[in-house]
Amino acid sequence: SAGAYGAATVWVADDQRLGAPLPQPRVDVLAKLVRDEGYDTVLFAQSVLAADVAAGLAARLDAGLNWGLTDLSADGTAKAPQLQDTVIVDVSWSSEVKLGMFRAGALDATETGRSAEIKDAAVELEDFSTQAEMVEQAHAEQQGPSIEDADVIVAGGRGLGEPEKFALAEELAQALGGAVAATRAVVDAGWYPYSAQVGQTGKTVSPKLYVALGISGAIQHKVGMQGSNVIVAINKDANAPIFEFADLGVVGDLHEIVPKLVELVRARKG
Ligand SMILES: Cc1cc2nc3c(=O)[nH]c(=O)nc-3n(C[C@H](O)[C@H](O)[C@H](O)COP(=O)(O)OP(=O)(O)OC[C@H]3O[C@@H](n4cnc5c(N)ncnc54)[C@H](O)[C@@H]3O)c2cc1C
């Protein structure tokens, strides 16, 4: 399906040695492709594995890597928010091969209606690339989309009052087909897992809709979610900082509002 979104060629490296999510074998395949095909730009979508692969490829090709990008221009410059997103910096590359890592959700895929040519990529691995072995892999249990991928996020903060009340956030997220996120205050208190934390020391997300329940809107939280298309905040304090950057603010008790909202969303969805 990459062809439908603009890819002219899709390279397939179908080899069981690439099965485990380890970076070095992927670096081998990519480095050979870049050298053989003369590609001058390699772009990654941010993830833990992509970060490892991009860093390895940068070292292998002596290429510059720009990180946390949100846009790329045809003139070879890119946009990179810095200093907790308070400034947007134009960055470029001085190396021949340019590597860029994009923030998750920074770009929307656009259908072009074309289709791609599918080619097999040669898999020739360096000896040192096969020295690491995946011994065990564990995934956090999760239902529904992850917060990095979700179009809708319902985030809960200390205003929920107690850990059990995260059920409200979960119900609303389920009704909207979204994922649940949390502030550091509630993660530190053990109400919700760290994997759901949004902010400076958590994840950066940019969904289409971010619903903040009982969240004050501290700068450390804001930097992780201010890229959301539409921010809706429910908070009982009309002076809460979150209302300074929310698109829609509802002043009131979330315990009264959210159950009604869930009912309404369910009724609307039939
Ligand atoms: C170095 C550093 C890094 C940090 N990193 C992060 C980070 O990554 N992510 C993050 O989130 N925070 C981070 N923080 C913490 C941040 O400063 C805030 O303390 C935290 O975001 C506050 O979480 P909160 O909004 O849930 O809680 P609070 O600030 O306590 O806000 C709770 C809100 O709920 C409202 N409320 C209460 N009851 C109700 C009700 N019944 N109905 C509706 N509203 C109600 C209150 O009016 C209040 O506005 C960091 C702090 C530091 C110093």
Image: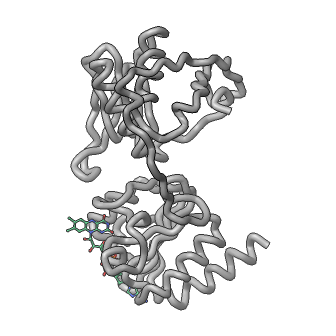
As displayed, is residue 103 above or below residue 185?
A: above
In this orientation, does residue 46 appear? no
Q: Quarter containing ligand 1? A: bottom left
Coloring applied to the structure: one colour
On the image, which quarter does residue 191 sit in? Answer: bottom left
Of residues 33 and 243, the one nearer the viewer is 33
On the image, which quarter does residue 193 sit in? Answer: bottom left
Of residues 194 and 134, the one nearer the viewer is 134
Of residues 133 and 168, the one nearer the viewer is 133
Relative to residue 246, is residue 270 drawn left or right?
A: right
Q: Residue at x 41, y 19 (%)?
A: 31
Of residues 246 and 34, the one nearer the viewer is 34
Quarter of the picture containing the C terminus is bottom right
Q: Where's residue 194, x and y in %? A: 38, 67
Q: Where's residue 122, x and y in %? A: 54, 16
Q: Residue at x 47, y 41 (%)?
A: 21
Relative to residue 218, is residue 159 drawn left or right?
A: right
Q: Where's residue 238, x and y in %? A: 36, 82
On the image, which quarter does residue 96 sit in? Answer: top left
Quarter of the picture containing the N terminus is top right
